[in-house]
Amino acid sequence: MNYSLRNHTPVFGYLLWIFGFIGAHRFYYGRPITGTIWFFTLGLFFVGWIIDLFLIPAMNRQVNQTYLSGRYNYNLAWLLLTFLGVFGIHRFYLGKWLTGILYLCTGGLFLLGILYDYWTLNRQIAENNQVFY
């Protein structure tokens, strides 16, 4: 199978940046600590959020060197997590049916599961993609 080497895109990074005051783009680019800080401080009181507008190209280059492309699409998984995470749709997409059902019944495991997935989704996708190589 021929998969694109680019697994994260700047366009999708900027889309998540719109919601960046909650740190979505930082999590997407594999920066969970600063993503959590953005989450709890509204993007460092919107100042860090504005600065990130200019940092996205560099973050995108770095993350594409870190994670492997494969069967599961990073952008689709992040889209599902960001907008439908409380229903566990991203977990169903990754073949994690039991936790998908658990998220569906508990509102994303009372939102704590969503935060956990923001921290680990890139790694979860990379691990699932390695299975198919």
Image (tube, rainbow, N blue to C red):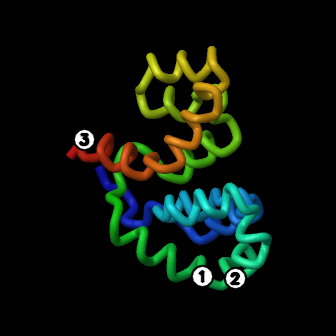
Q: Nearer the viewer, residue 31 or 17?
A: 31
Query: Which of the two discs, 1 and 3, sits closer to the camera?
Result: 1
Which residue is at 76% across, 62% downward?
A: 42
The local secondary structure at tag 3 comes to loop
Which residue is at 67% across, 56% downward?
A: 39
Q: Earlier in the sequence, mark 1 or mark 3?
A: 1
The local secondary structure at tag 1 comes to helix
* Amino acid at circle 2: Ile
Question: Mark on residue 21?
Answer: none
Which residue is at 66% across, 63% downward?
A: 38
| Disc 1/disc 2 C-alpha distance (Å) | 7 Å
Quadrant of res 124: top left
Q: Nearer the viewer, residue 14 or 115?
A: 115
**Where is 105 relative to 71, above or below?**
above
Q: Which residue is mark 1?
A: 55
Q: Which residue is mark 2?
A: 51
Other-residue count near label 2 (Cα within 10 Å), few / some / many at <14 / 14–19 / ≥20: few
Marks 1,3: beta carbons within 8 A: no
Other-residue count near label 3 (Cα within 10 Å), few / some / many at <14 / 14–19 / ≥20: few
Question: Mark on residue 132?
Answer: 3
* Amino acid at circle 1: Leu
The local secondary structure at tag 2 comes to helix
The picture places residue 71, in percent across and down from the top left corner, at 37, 44
Marks 1,2: beta carbons within 8 A: yes
The picture places residue 106, in percent across and down from the top left corner, at 63, 19
| Disc 1/disc 3 C-alpha distance (Å) | 32 Å
